Every structure is written in C-alpha cells, then in structure tokens.
Image (cartoon, rainbow, N blue to C red):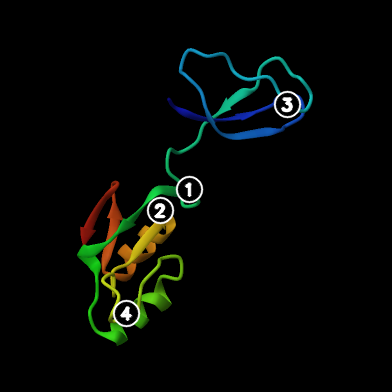
C-alpha cells in the first residue's frame, strides 16, 4: 500500500506517512473536519526516514582501529563497533538513509543519478 503525506487546505494541518490504497478517498482533517485533505508531493525516501531493517555495510568495513575510529567520527549516525571481539567489528550499520549516505561518502563513494559510484 502506498504512503502519502496530506495537508488540510483550511487549517494547514499535516498528516505524514499515511498508508492508503490508491483508490481510497483523501482523509478528513482530524482538527477542523475539512472534507478532503490534499496530497502533498513527497520523495519516497528522505534523509530522515528510518529503515525497517538496519543495513549492514560489509563492503565498506574497515579492520584497523584507527580506521574504525575515523569512520565513527565521520559517520556519527551509523553504528560501528570498535570492539575487536565483536563479530561486527568495523562494519557500519545504517539505520537511516542519512547514515547510509554518510558512510558511503566517508568511504569514497558518491551518489550520481541514484546510483553509487566509487570515485
């Protein structure tokens, strides 16, 4: 089922991330009761949306402790273990698109036309 954002034309109240079938009518405003809220154009993925399942980024994992600490410093939104006994040692775990993009940028990748390309 698609996700939509809606805005009330009367009171400007917003509903974010509403699951609706494509054939269903726009919802009523919960604040003022306006008959039909308007769909707001939005991107399907934004930096603030969290992933349902965290992404373990094995392809950009680092092994030495200095590299791990540098990656932690450059990617504060990603989880990166610095415990050598941890099986996930040095593997960035992204829980949002923002964290994923931070790790890719710190690892020398750049986003071009929605594809990841190594510099």
Nearer mark to the viewer, of 4 and 2: 4
Compared to residue 73, the image places residue 55 above or below, namely above
Q: Residue at x 72, y 32 (%)?
A: 12
Q: In what quadrant of the picture does the N terminus appear? A: top left
Q: Is residue 27 left or right of residue 45?
A: right
How far, Cα to Cα, is label 4 from label 2?
20 Å
How far, Cα to Cα, is label 4 from label 1?
25 Å
Q: Position of residue 56 (x, y in %)?
A: 29, 59
Compared to residue 1, the image places residue 64 above or below, namely below
Q: In what quadrant of the picture does the C terminus appear? A: bottom left
Residue under circle 1?
A: 49
Nearer mark to the viewer, of 3 and 2: 3
Residue 97: assigned label: 2
Q: Position of residue 5 (x, y in %)?
A: 56, 32
Residue under circle 4?
A: 68
Residue 30: assigned label: 3
């Amino acid at each position: 089922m698609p996700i939509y954002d809606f805005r009330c034309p009367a009171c400007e109240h917003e509903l974010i991330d509403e699951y609706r079938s494509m054939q269903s009518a726009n919802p009523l405003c919960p604040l003022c009761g306006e008959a039909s809220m308007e769909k707001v154009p939005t991107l399907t993925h934004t930096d603030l949306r969290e992933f349902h399942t965290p992404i373990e980024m094995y392809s950009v994992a680092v092994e030495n402790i200095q590299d791990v600490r540098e990656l932690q410093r450059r990617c504060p939104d990603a989880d990166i273990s610095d415990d050598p006994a941890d099986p996930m040692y040095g593997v960035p775990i992204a829980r949002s698109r923002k964290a994923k993009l931070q790790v890719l940028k710190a690892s020398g990748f750049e986003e071009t036309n929605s594809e990841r390309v190594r510099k």
